[in-house]
Amino acid sequence: MIDKLTLNSTLDREEFLNLISNITEDDKQYLFGQAMQARRRHYGNAVYLRGLIEFTNMCKRNCRYCGIRAANKNADRYRLSNDEILSCCENGYRLGFRTFVLQGGEDDYFTDDRLCGLVSEIKARYPDAAVTLSVGERPKNSYQRLFDAGADRYLLRHETASGRLYNQLHEEMSLSNRKQCLYDLKEIGYQVGAGFMVGLPGQTDEDLVEDLVFLKELSPHMVGIGPFIPQKDTPLANEKSGTAEKTVLLLAVIRLLLPNVLLPATTALGTITPKGREMGLMAGANVLMPNLSPVSVRKKYSLYDGKICTGEEAAECLNCISLRIKSCGLSPDMSRGDFKI
Ligand code: SF4
């Protein structure tokens, strides 16, 4: 089955289910080896570093798993000014970053005019850097304006492709609209990132198969997945976390499903277990996202409990992450790291 996936870059639903539900330890090691070879074929030993700027934790939505959901009165809210965001970019550029990822909640303060102004200012100052946005669902014409202002990439996790689970987790949101946003972004010309959570309360392996089938259909340029981790002020506070083991298994499957995809080993994976990001790299991941946000706000961007890397300055973060990459026999790469066709 692993060879079939490697050869054809897909499986049918039943085969996916069998693979993720019944894989043996030996087969898992074989799968990881195949995933690493696929990564090497497309990207060599490079692991791309993206500078993450969490610029607002205001959000109008109420996703049940999220620590910065609107209903959480305990969240300590902040919004960085343009000058603060630009100074994060300046610091990041000096350290060598050539991708800035601007991530935030769905914060209506950031109108198209404000966000377009910010994106074009960053692109004017750093024309050789890529700008990635991750600011949720917006109308297609808004995505178009941001693209025209210079945004190169857009991250919008679909979170789960199971309609049942999606509806349980998201009030007043719909999976069909989420998917439509992703198709709109792709049509406009962004490099697009989708992704999902592993180990959500009530999630079955059949639900995860739906994620794999949807990813194949969408064929995004980037896929971000991480274990579900509960946050104490949310309705899911007492639920169990997802596991690193299942997450890395799915990372390896995704590497073979979309061999040239840009695939982060996420902070959530590093939070659930100390060597989580290394495990991700050894299963085919090829992106890491060190944090460039000011240390003073890091703890406030608390999507889930126990988040790592909230105390270090950007340079320390970069150093620590570079060492982790090298410990896996891979090399940190700070170039733009665009998707390779
Ligand atoms: S997951 Fe995103 S959209 Fe949902 S509440 Fe959190 S920040 Fe807002």
Image (cartoon, grey):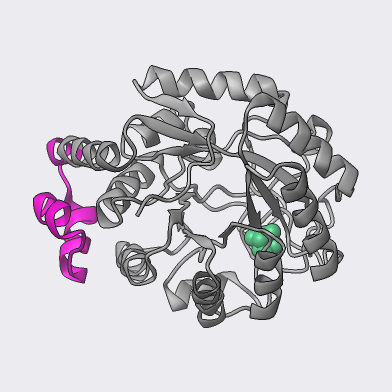
Q: Is residue 27 above or below residue 220?
A: above
Please identify the quarter of the rendering in which residue 104 is found.
bottom right
Which is nearer the eye, 286 or 66? Answer: 286
Q: The N terminus lies in which quarter of the figure?
A: bottom left
Which is nearer the eye, 152 or 282? Answer: 152
Q: Is residue 252 visible?
A: yes
- The residue drawn where x is 68% and y is 21% is 315
Q: Quadrant of ligand 1?
A: bottom right
Q: Is residue 198 visible?
A: no
Task: Tell me where residue 90 appears, x and y as whole percent.
Answer: 77, 33
- The residue drawn where x is 37% and y is 33% is 281
Q: Would residue 20 be counted in the magenta stretch? A: yes
Question: Magenta segment, which residues?
Answer: 1-28
Q: Is residue 86 above or below residue 139?
A: above
Q: Is residue 301 above or below residue 210?
A: above
Left or right position of 24 against 113: left
Task: Tell me where residue 68 appears, x and y as whole percent.
Answer: 74, 55
Q: Would residue 190 be counted in the magenta stretch? A: no
- The residue drawn where x is 50% and y is 49% is 240
Q: The C terminus lies in which quarter of the figure?
A: bottom left
Please identify the quarter of the rendering in which residue 278 is found.
top left
Task: Tell me where residue 25 appears, x and y as whole percent.
Answer: 17, 37
Left or right position of 168 against 310: left
Left or right position of 148 against 82: left
Label tally: 0
Left or right position of 167 against 73: left
Q: Main secondary structure of the magenta part?
A: helix
Task: Tell me where residue 139 appears, x and y as whole percent.
Answer: 67, 79
